[in-house]
Amino acid sequence: DGGITQSPKYLFRKEGQNVTLSCEQNLNHDAMYWYRQDPGQGLRLIYYSQIVNDFQKGDIAEGYSVSREKKESFPLTVTSAQKNPTAFYLCASRTTGHLGQPQHFGDGTRLSIL
Amino acid sequence: AQSVTQLDSQVPVFEEAPVELRCNYSSSVSVYLFWYVQYPNQGLQLLLKYLSGSTLVKGINGFEAEFNKSQTSFHLRKPSVHISDTAEYFCAVTFTGFQKLVFGTGTRLLVSP
């Protein structure tokens, strides 16, 4: 079945440590997205990519980095510069060409501070 | 500025009762509208979408929504809810000319027996 796989499901970060969240899709979608979800705040866009080797900052990109070397993969690195990384992180993808195409979501990674 | 508002953070309802979850948006351009559902510790699943045409849109699990352009609203309804509908519901809007999807803050639907 086609879908989006996020790993790991749970992740713990030590102070001063960078961690990388994986997102892989086999839907053949061009566009991929990373969101951060905090209670009562909905989803906030961190980074997005509409094509391989290109990505743009979203609304809360500070302390995060991404790469898009392959169409299927869009890993997110939470750097030590992100002072409040505890949250639920969601990856999404969609086909491009029409803004009405919906985004499809993975099952998320929950990141906590040790 | 473009924005999406879900005024109700939580909606309690009894099983088999009807429910309406409200969503309003602010925009000076055309929009595409979506409702997503999120069960605990899972991602978001698309319930329904409005792109154009008939303003009444039917989705999965018996949900429907009505687009009202004059009131800039896209309220979600279900005539009879089940315990299994307990989840968080997000309204989301794509504004013409912008590549981003803007989410409301979510409404937690709590269905009790």
Image: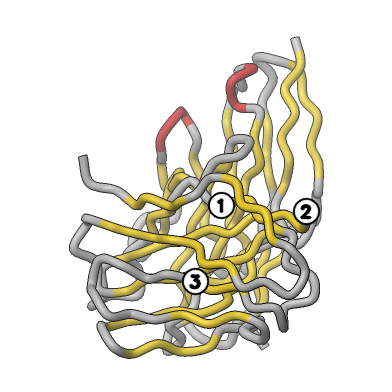
Q: Mark 1 points at which residue?
A: A109
From the top left corner, tell me how far across and down residue B60 is, in percent: 41, 35
Q: Quadrant of the C terminus of chain B?
A: top right
Pinpoint the chain carrying mark 2. Answer: A
Q: Which of B52 and A64 is in front in this view?
A: A64
Q: Height in image: B23 above or below A77? A: above
Q: How far apart are marks 1 and 3 (CA)?
A: 11 Å
**Residue A79 seen in the current view:** yes
- The residues tagged by marks 3 and 2 sit, at their Cα atoms, a distance apart of 21 Å
Residue at left offset 59%, top offset 59%: A89
**Is residue A76 left or right of B3 when viewed as pictured?**
left
Chain under numbered label 3 = A
Q: Is residue A111 left or right of residue A19?
A: right
Using the image, tell me which numbered label, if any, was put on residue A76.
3
Label 1: element kind: strand
Query: Residue at left 29%, top 88%?
Result: A53
Residue nearest the observer in this picture, B7 or A93: A93
Q: Distance between the residues labelled 2 and 1?
A: 15 Å
First in residue order: circle 2 vs circle 1: 2
Kind of residue at badge 2: Pro
Residue A84 is drawn in which quadrant?
bottom right
Marked residue nearer the N-terminal end (3 or 2): 2
